[in-house]
Image (cartoon, grey):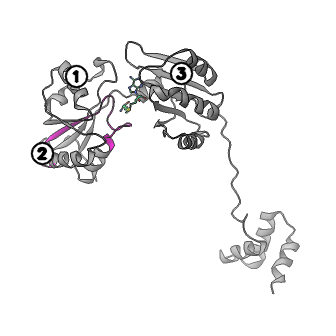
Amino acid sequence: MEQKSFQNEEEGCLYLIPTPIGNLEDLTFRALRLLKEVHVVAAEDTRQTRKLFNHFEIATPLVSYHEHNKRTSGEKLIERMKSGEKVGLVTDAGTPGISDPGQDLVQLCVEESVPVIPLPGACAATTALIASGLSTDHFLFYGFLPRQKKDRQKALEELQNQPYTLIFYEAPHRLKETISAMASTFGSRPVALARELTKRYESFVRGAFADLHDWLRTHEVKGECCIIVEGNQAPIVEEEQPFWEEMSALDHIKFYIKKGMDKKDAIKMTAADRGLPKREVYNLYHQED
Ligand code: SAM
């Protein structure tokens, strides 16, 4: 269904409003105007958003919308939007919907044909990527790895062959363990750790996993961080099994006959596929008679 975002001023809608990931100057003019104009702002943590509102003198009513009330709160918000209200969605920091509960409300709006209007703005993933020194041509945003060791290892192995720059979010208290797990899976690839983006203590550690490992041994990591890893420059291409690998030679011939070939061609193709003499395959087929 087509959505025309700016054709009906009277219609209720959801604005996805990015907020700063540290530096308050990163709130855009448009975000500020809409935060003041909408009927209500749904926030992941109203206390956190209240600080932003106080700083910018925003008096719009706040309601909470987070992981644990997203169903009930989401339904109430949909009702309000359907009755013509404009709702702004903000999360604790950054772009709503990126590794936070925003996507559920968006899906609900799409199901209910409520327009969803996105605003561009601060996002830790792209901010970290552009200064990582790694390729920005193609990248894969992964977000948070699973917490369980086994699940994390499985996820890393699935990513091992990806040729694209990989972007991860991680909490500071899990960083050392995650970097060790990555080092054993990704080997000697270049990596960049971006910390406290846009804040006073913003820093980047760039190098190989071994360098990062050494750095982590002597530094206590505080603050939020992103890990950017070079994609696999020499992915191992697994050879595809030929379709007939599990068939007997006889079934292989029958397969081609079923596809519409005459017997002679089916025998010829089977012999060529298997690298066998035609006569041998011919005899095999006629042993059946
Ligand atoms: N929606 C947010 C966005 O657009 O970036 C991300 C929300 S996610 C719950 C929080 C994670 O983002 C943190 O654990 C960290 O990995 C990353 N992050 C957020 N702010 C950051 C900052 N200032 N510096 C580095 N990483 C940050």
Residue 228: image location, x then y, percent: 52, 28
Residue 28: image location, x then y, percent: 26, 24
- Tag 1: residue type? Lys
Q: Along the line of sight, which residue is nearer the eye, 6 or 180? A: 180
Q: Quadrant of ligand 1?
A: top left
The answer to if 96 sits in the magenta stretch is: yes
Q: Determine whether the beta carbon of the residue marked 1 sits less than 8 angstroms from the nearest atom of ligand 1.
A: no
Residue 133's disc is 3
* Above or below: residue 149 compared with residue 122: below
Q: Nearer the viewer, mark 1 or mark 2?
A: 1
The residue range painted magenta reads 82-103
Please tell me in which quadrant of the rendered image residue 271 appears. Answer: bottom right
Q: Which residue is mark 1?
A: 51
Q: Which residue is mark 2?
A: 84
- Tag 2: residue type? Gly
Question: Which comes before the other along the chain, label 1 or label 3?
Answer: 1
Left or right of 289? Residue 116 is: left
* Above or below: residue 36 compared with residue 146: above
**The residue tagged with tag 1: helix, strand or loop?**
helix
Left or right of 66? Residue 147 is: right
